[in-house]
Image: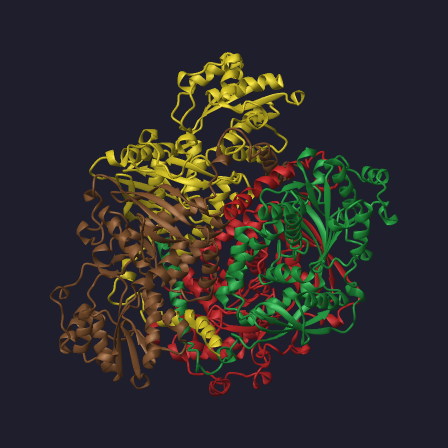
Chain colours: A green, B red, C brown, D yellow
Amino acid sequence: MSGDIKKIVLAYSGGLDTSVILRWLQETYSCEVVTFTADIGQGEELEPARAKAELLGVKPGNIYIDDLREEFVRDFVFPMFRANTLYEGTYLLGTSIARPLIAKRQIEIANEVGADAVAHGATGKGNDQVRFELGYYALKPDIKVIAPWRQWDLNSRTRLLDYAEQHQIPIAKDKRGEAPYSTDANLLHISYEGKALEDPWVEPDEDMFTRSIAPEKAPDTPTYVEVEFKHGDAVAVDGVALSPAQVLTKLNELGGQNGIGRLDLVENRFVGMKSRGVYETPGGTILLAAHRGIESITLDRGAMHLKDDVMPRYAELIYNGFWFSPERLAIQALIDSTQQQVNGTVRLKLFKGQASVVGRKSPNSLYRLDYVTFEADSVYNQKDAEGFIKLNALRLRLGAMAKGS
Amino acid sequence: MSGDIKKIVLAYSGGLDTSVILRWLQETYSCEVVTFTADIGQGEELEPARAKAELLGVKPGNIYIDDLREEFVRDFVFPMFRANTLYEGTYLLGTSIARPLIAKRQIEIANEVGADAVAHGATGKGNDQVRFELGYYALKPDIKVIAPWRQWDLNSRTRLLDYAEQHQIPIAKDKRGEAPYSTDANLLHISYEGKALEDPWVEPDEDMFTRSIAPEKAPDTPTYVEVEFKHGDAVAVDGVALSPAQVLTKLNELGGQNGIGRLDLVENRFVGMKSRGVYETPGGTILLAAHRGIESITLDRGAMHLKDDVMPRYAELIYNGFWFSPERLAIQALIDSTQQQVNGTVRLKLFKGQASVVGRKSPNSLYRLDYVTFEADSVYNQKDAEGFIKLNALRLRLGAMAKGS
Amino acid sequence: MSGDIKKIVLAYSGGLDTSVILRWLQETYSCEVVTFTADIGQGEELEPARAKAELLGVKPGNIYIDDLREEFVRDFVFPMFRANTLYEGTYLLGTSIARPLIAKRQIEIANEVGADAVAHGATGKGNDQVRFELGYYALKPDIKVIAPWRQWDLNSRTRLLDYAEQHQIPIAKDKRGEAPYSTDANLLHISYEGKALEDPWVEPDEDMFTRSIAPEKAPDTPTYVEVEFKHGDAVAVDGVALSPAQVLTKLNELGGQNGIGRLDLVENRFVGMKSRGVYETPGGTILLAAHRGIESITLDRGAMHLKDDVMPRYAELIYNGFWFSPERLAIQALIDSTQQQVNGTVRLKLFKGQASVVGRKSPNSLYRLDYVTFEADSVYNQKDAEGFIKLNALRLRLGAMAKGS
Amino acid sequence: MSGDIKKIVLAYSGGLDTSVILRWLQETYSCEVVTFTADIGQGEELEPARAKAELLGVKPGNIYIDDLREEFVRDFVFPMFRANTLYEGTYLLGTSIARPLIAKRQIEIANEVGADAVAHGATGKGNDQVRFELGYYALKPDIKVIAPWRQWDLNSRTRLLDYAEQHQIPIAKDKRGEAPYSTDANLLHISYEGKALEDPWVEPDEDMFTRSIAPEKAPDTPTYVEVEFKHGDAVAVDGVALSPAQVLTKLNELGGQNGIGRLDLVENRFVGMKSRGVYETPGGTILLAAHRGIESITLDRGAMHLKDDVMPRYAELIYNGFWFSPERLAIQALIDSTQQQVNGTVRLKLFKGQASVVGRKSPNSLYRLDYVTFEADSVYNQKDAEGFIKLNALRLRLGAMAKGS
C-alpha cells in the first residue's frame, strides 16, 4: 500500500488528532505530506498549526494556511440561506456546509503541489468523511483518499495518546483526559456531540456553550436589528454595508449576546444511525428568520412554494455531502433564479433566545395594501371569488356525485 | 333569486356581522334560517348567541349550538400536527384547520333539517370563503352557497351599522367604532389582521395580544414540561393522561404563561394577494416542537424525509381549503402510516417566548448509543464506510471524467 | 362597458368564429379592432385571413400576420422537451405550449398599437381561455381582456350562423353544418375534441386523422432515423443540420409516414372537468423518445431523477397556463442547468405507430463499458458493494430491531 | 470466517452459477445448505433444480421449491402498477419487483429451518445484490449475508467452469461457451444485458427476443382486448374473471403475439454506473396503459397529480431495493388510498408493438358529458371562468407591476 502514494495533502487543524495523523501518514506512506489549515471562522489561532507542522517535519513550502472566511460565507453559506435551508426541520447545517469548501481547497492544493492523495481526520461513523470524500472525488476523480480513522488501529483514546508520546507529538494538558464532547466550529456555528450528550433525555450543561450567553442571562430588554438584503443575500446590518463574512460576524455577535441560536436535536446521519447533536448558530438563526421575512413581501407565491417544496431535498443533499453534485447545482439554479427581486430590509427583535421578525419593507414589495383592505373594490372584484371557488370546487363536486351514485 | 332557496343554515357567531347576515338572509330569501354556533375553543360564551338568534326570530328548534372542541383537536388539529405542518415555513394554520370542521357540521345540519343552502360571514377577499365553500361542495355537491359579503351592498362599516339600526339588531357599544383589527380564534390559535397591522414594517402593539404574556414579562425561570405521545398524538402532559382538547388547553396555558407562540408574518392568500397576519398559538408551538422531538428518535430517516418533502404541499392544501380533497386524504394516509412507532416522551424548556426540546425518550427508540460511540466496532464496521462512499461517489467521478475529456 | 375600450387586439384565425367575434367587438365596443394572425405551423394559408379582415373593415395597417414557427419551436417547444414533459403521463401538451406565444405576441402588438384590450376566441369551458389570459395579465397587468364566448349570447351554432348572416360574414359551405369535432393545430400537434369523441368508450374514426397515416397502412419495413442533440436540443436529423422548426417539420414528416404519435385520452382540465381528446404529435413523439435516449447516456443520475421528480409539476404549470409564472421560470432554470452535456446522437426505429430508441452515442457519454463488465475489477471494486449495502441497510435493521423488541 | 455460520439458505435456480455457489458454500462454511427455488413465472421447469440439489448433497428436507406466482402478482406487481410505475420514464421494473419476494421467502425459510445465513448469486456490480440484501436485513436484522461473487476468486468464466469440473457439477452443453447476454425472467418480464448488448449504439439481434414476436411479424390486423379493474387491480380480461397471475399470463400472451413490450435502454444503477438493458414486458406494457386509462375517468385530478408527483421516487425506491422500507410503505398507503373508485373497463388496441387505449367506461366515472359540451350551461356557468382566471392571475399581475415600477 505504502508504495503507491507519492504526496499527500492533509486537512490539518494543528490539534492532537490531526498531528497524530500527520505523523502516521509520514510513517505509513514514507512520502511528503502537505498540510492545509483553513480559517473558516472557527475562532482559533492558525499560526500554532504552522509551528506544529514544522515541528513534525513538514517543509515550510508544504504548509498552507488560508483565510477562507469570505469565500465560505459568500459561496457556501449565502447560497444555502437563499433556500431557507433546514435539515429535518431544524438543523441549519453549520458543519455540513463547511466541508465542501475544505475539500475544494484541498484539491486545489493537491493540483498545485502535484499530490496524488488527500487525507482527512474524520471518523468512520460520521457524515464528515462522506462530505470530504464526495467533494474530493467530484473535483478530482482519480484522487486517492486516505481516511486514517478507518484504516489504522489507533481506535481508542489510550492508543492515540501512546502513539503521540512515542512520536514526540506535543499533547496539550487539557487533551490528556477525554473531552466531554467533540466539537466542530466555523463562522456559521459550533457543534457538540458525543460523551456527555449521548443520552438524548439529558439536557446539556450550561457551561458547554461558547458562542451564546444563556437566554436566562441575556439582556432584559430586547435588541432590535435591521438586516438589508440584495438579491437574496444580506448586505448590510443596521444600515452599515458589510461583506458576507462581516455580516455573519456581526449577526453572531448580536445573536450570541441575546442567547439566540441554540439547538438540541437527534438527527439522522447519512451513514444510517441517529446521533444527538447540540449546536449554536446565533447569526445563522437571525439570518434565516430575516431571509424568510424579506421573501415574504418580495417573492411570488408560486416561486416560494416551489422553493419550500424542494428545500428538504436540497438540505438532504448538503447534509449528505452532495454539494458538488449535478442535482445540487440544478436546485441552486432554481433557487437563485427566484432571488432577483428579493431586496429590502427586515427588522428583527432579539430577546432571550428568540429572533422574531417584526417589520419588513422593500422597493420590490408585492404586498399591496389596496388589494387587502376590506372595503371598496377598486382593484379587486370580490365577485370574482365566486367563480374562483366554483371552478376549484368542480372536481370535488363531481367526485362527491360519483360516490353518491 | 330569492324564490329558489327554501331553508338556509348559517354559520352564526352571535356577533354583529353574522346577526346582520341573519336578518339580511331572512329578508332577501324570505325563508327559514337555521343558525349554527360552534364551540371550537374560541373562548366566548355561546348562550348569548342563542338569545340573539331567538331575538332575531329564529325558532328554538332551528338554533344549533355544539361543543366541537374534542372533535376539532382529535380529527383536525392532531392529524395536521402528525405532519409537522407549517405554511410558508412558519404559520401553524390555526384558522385554516378550523374551517373544514365548521363546514362539515354545517352540512350535517343542512342534511338533518332539509336545508338547501348554507351561508357564511367570510368576506370576498380572504381565504375563509374558499375553505368554507370547498368544504360545503365536497360534502354536498348540490348545496347552494350564500356569501352575503360578495353579494350585498353593505360594503362599508357605516352601511352595516345603518342596516343593523334599521333592523333593530343590537349593537354592542364597543362595536360602534371600527375595530383596530379583525380576529379569529379557536382552541389552536387567535389571529389578528387588518387596520392597525396593515403596514408590515410596523410592529404590533403589545396590548393587542390576548393569549400570551409578553416574553419580557414572562417568568424569569424556565418552566419544564413533558409531553407524552402515542402513535404520533399527544396523550399526556407532565404524566397526566388528557383528552385531545385537554392536552391543547393545558399546553396553551403553559405556553401563554411563558410568552410562547407569537408570530408576525406576511402570507400569500389563495385568492392571490399577500396579507399581514399576527398569530398566537401557544400550545401548538409547543406541540410542534414536541412532535418533531419524539419523531427524532422514533421515526426512520426515509419516512421522516418523505414526510418533510410532502409537508409543504400538505400545508398548502389545508391553507387553501382542500381538507376534504382526495389528495389531502391520500397524503394523510401516507403521514398516518408512519406514526405507529411514534411513541414516547419529550421534555421541553419553556422560557420567555421559546419552547426548546431538551430531552426525548421512547420504548421504540431508534437511537442506539452502541452505534454512535467513537470506539470499538462491535455493531458497526467503520470499514463499510469506504465502500459506501466509493459507490456514492462513482457517478460524480464518472461525471468529472466525462467533463475532463 | 362599451365606452371603456379604445382599441382591441384580437387573436384572429380568419375562420367563422373569430370573424363573428371581430364583427361583434366592432359593434359592441365601437372601437378599432386590430387582428393578429400567427403562423405557428397549423398548416393553413394565412392570406385569406388578411382578405377577410379587410372585408370586415379592418384597416390594412391594423392587420398583423406573423410567421412565428421558429420562435415557437426554439423558445417554447424545445425548452419544454428538455424536461421530457408529459401531462398526466401521456399528453405532449401540443395545444398548451402554443398559447403563451400567441398571448405574448398579442401583447407586443397591443403595446405597439397602443391598444388597451385584447380578445380571444376560446370558450368558457376550456383551458385555452386560462392560458391566453394568464399570459396577457402576466405580461401587461393592466390590460383589459375580452372573452366573447363568456360574454355574449351567441351560445349556439344556430345563433352564431344567424349573426354571421345578418352581418354579411362569409360562411364557408363546410362550416354550415356542425363539425364532428373541433380541432387545434400547430407545428407540434393537432387535437380533436367534442361531438363525435364525446363517448370515451368509442374509438375515433380513422378518417378523422390528418397528420399520420394509420399504423395499419404504414410501410411494412421500418424507417431508421438519427437525431443529433446539442445542449439538449435537436439540431440535426440524419446528419443534416436543421433549424428548430425544420427539425420538427422533418420529424413530423417521418412520424406521420409511419403512423406515429396518435394519442387518445381523457384528461383533467384546469377548470375542473374531465374531457376526451385525441391528438396527433408525430414529430414530438419521436423527439421525446430521442431526448430521453440521449439523456440516458449523458445525464447524471441525480440530475435525471431530480428532473423526473419535478416534471409532472412543470407539465401541470404549462397545461394550466402558467408559462410566464416565476415558478415555471425557476423550474426551467433547473432543467436548463442540466442540459450542457446532453450532446450526441440517437438512433430510432420508426415502425407502424412506434418510435423506439435502438442506439445512442455521445462525446460526453457517461456510459463506461469498463465499469459494467462482469469480469476483472480494475476500476470498480466489487467489495465496495458490501459496505454500500450495509450502510444503506443500517436504518432498516435498526427499525426491525426496534419493532422486534 | 467459516466457523461462524451454521446453516445457509441459498436462492437456488438450479443453473450452473448457483450450483457452483452451492458447492462452494458447502466447502467454505462446512455447514448445511438449504436450497430455495421459486416459481415466479420464469418459464422453467423447477424439478431439475431438485434433482441437481440432491445430486450436490442437499438433503431432501432441505430443498424448498415454491410456486409464488400468485403472491408475486398480487402483492408485488399489482401494488406497483397502481402507481403507474416507470423508472427513468420507461422501465417497468420487472427485475426489481421480484427480488423482495425472493428475499422475503428466503428469510421465512431461514426462520423455519433455523438458518443463520442466506446467500444469493448476484454479482458485486449490479442492483440485485442490493435488492436481495436490503430485503434480508429489513426482515431479519441479525441475518448473515453471503454474496459469493463478492467474496470468492472465481471471477472469470474459465475459473468457474474449472471449479464446476473439479467438483463434478454437471455443465449443460450450451453453458460451456460464454452466453451472449445474461437474462433474468419472471412472470412480468425477461431482461437481457451484457456482452452482445454492451455497445449502446448497436441494436440487439432479433433472435435474442423470447417473449414477443417481432412487430414486423405480428398480425396485420389489430387485436382488441378489454381489461376490467376493481380497486385499481385488473380482475378480468375480455370478460373472463381471472386471478392476478392469470391476468398477467393472459396479457403476456396477447402482448407477445402482437410484438408488444420491448424496451431498449441505458439505465442508472444504484451502485453508480450506467448499464444497457433490453427488456420484454408484454403483459405489463398493456397493463400500464390500461391502468392509466381506467384512472383517466375514475381518478380525481388532485389525487392523480399527487400520484404522478411521487411516482418517480416510488420507482426509485423499488429499483434501489427499498421495497420493505418505511418510506415505500408510506407511499404505498398514499397510492392505495386513491384506488377505491378505480373500477371499470378499458378497451385497448394491440397492433405490431403498440398497446393503445381506445375506450374506457366505469360505474364510477368522473367524466361528465353535460359539463363538457360546448352549448348551454345548465351545470357549469361559463362566467365563473372569469373570476377563476382573474384570481389565478392576480399574483402574476402584482409581480409584473412590481417589476415595472
Left/right placement of residue B135 relative to residue A293 reads: left
Placement of the C terminus of chain C among the 4 image quadrants? top right
**A281 up-or-down from C309: above or below:** below
Nearer to us in this view, B295 or A61: A61
The foreground one among B311 and A119 is A119
Q: Position of residue B393 (x, y in %)?
A: 57, 43
Task: Pinpoint residue A358: horizontal percent, then vertical percent.
Answer: 64, 73
Give left or right: position of C267 versus C362. left
Q: Is residue D204 visible?
A: yes
The percent coordinates of residue D145 (x first, y second) are: 59, 28
Q: Residue extending furthest left?
A: C173
Q: Is residue A9 left or right of residue D60?
A: right
On screen, residue D210 above or below B19: above
Q: Is residue A293 above or below residue D325?
A: below
Please say whether residue B140 is visible from this viewpoint.
no
User: Between residues A54 and B370, which one lies in front from this camera angle?
Assistant: A54
**Could you say where residue C45 lies in the image, as x and y percent from the top left?**
19, 65
